[in-house]
Image: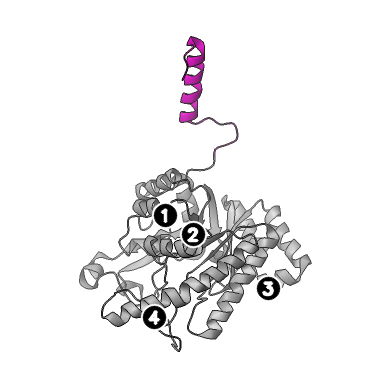
Amino acid sequence: MKLGLYANGRKELPLGEMLAYAHGLGIQMIEIACGEESGVAHCDPKQLLADDSALAEFQEAFRRNDLEISALSCHGNPISPNKDTARLSDECMRNAVLLAEKIGLDTICCFSGCPGDHEGAKYSNWITVNWPMDYAEVYRWQWEEVLIPYWKDFASFARLHGVTRIALELHPGQMCYNPQTVKRLRRAVGDEIGVNLDFSHLLWQRMDPVTVIEEIKGFIYHMHAKDIGFQEQEIKANGYITTDFFDDRLSRPWNFRTVGYGHDMFFWKNIFAALNRAGYDYVASIEMECELMDKQQGIEKAVAFLKDALIFDEKEGSINWIKGVKESKGKLYEKYGIQE
């Protein structure tokens, strides 16, 4: 697995400086924001698609710093009931696909989105219960009339342009927020639909990381390395669901943290072992949203932590324990003329 960074963690730096900084830390892959809430500090697909010279400079900056792009990321709501919002999200995502095609990348990260509760709605409506029965009907409409048709069309567009891995971040407030919902969308749309696995959004829903990995193995397309800390007294009093915003951190039952400041090394090593067993060997992309420290300190502590926790790619020619046993067994069988 490779050590990655979501570049928005240092969006105050120009692209070249950010990449040099990442390279200096030992980062191997960069996840690049492509609009909407993520902004375009380091990458504006619309501009790069229209200017071959700017695109060449963009790619050269990565080559110069010996870095790869893990994904192009758009964090918006392409099925928002606000038509302008939906149109902007869809445009940003399609431009990300077109840029990915140009640079030979097959992965984008985004959200599934959340619609309103009827065609004329003004705001999104995230349904979490099936009673009273109004909710069940709204939920059926959202899936059958909005979510599935949109993603069938978008996945077809992505496929046409060589993007075969659409990594949806499972996030409360989105239609796909757990393994069950993303598997339902994948069945309806196709294998392009997968997951950008961010455990910080799953842990406060009380999901077990290793069980989640087992549920979605084979379509984990990207991963965010981000932790979460809990305030047990607040949880005992009011539960895990909160509408307090992130800057009101002392009243919240949970807050985002850099890896290692919510759960210990043993916890994270179990996660990376489970990912390895599930066949995921792509990137752990540090997303910096820590309540405790500034961005630079949070990123650098995450890098140090992950260098110990990750199972990195084997060097060419190395032989792990299992390969060594197989070689010894083969030689022994050959020596004594034993047929397997």
The residue furthest left is 237
Q: How is this picture coloured?
A: one colour
Q: Is residue 5 magenta?
A: no
Q: For mark 3, give the secondary structure.
A: helix
Circle 1 sits on which residue?
A: 216
Considering only order in the chain, which callout, 2 or 4, is on the residue closer to the N terminus? 4
Task: Give the magenta range.
Answer: 314-340
Circle 2 sits on which residue?
A: 194
Left or right of 327? Residue 22 is: right
| Badge 3 amino acid | Lys
Residue at point 59% right, 51% down?
28
Residue 229, position as x, y percentages in the image: 34, 62
Circle 4 sits on which residue?
A: 125
Q: CA distance from mark 4 to mark 2?
A: 23 Å
The front one of 157 and 279 is 157
Q: CA distance from mark 4 to mark 3?
A: 30 Å
| Mark 2: few/some/many CA within 10 Å (<14, 14-19, 20+) | many
Q: CA distance from mark 3 to mark 1?
A: 33 Å
Q: CA distance from mark 1 to mark 2?
A: 8 Å
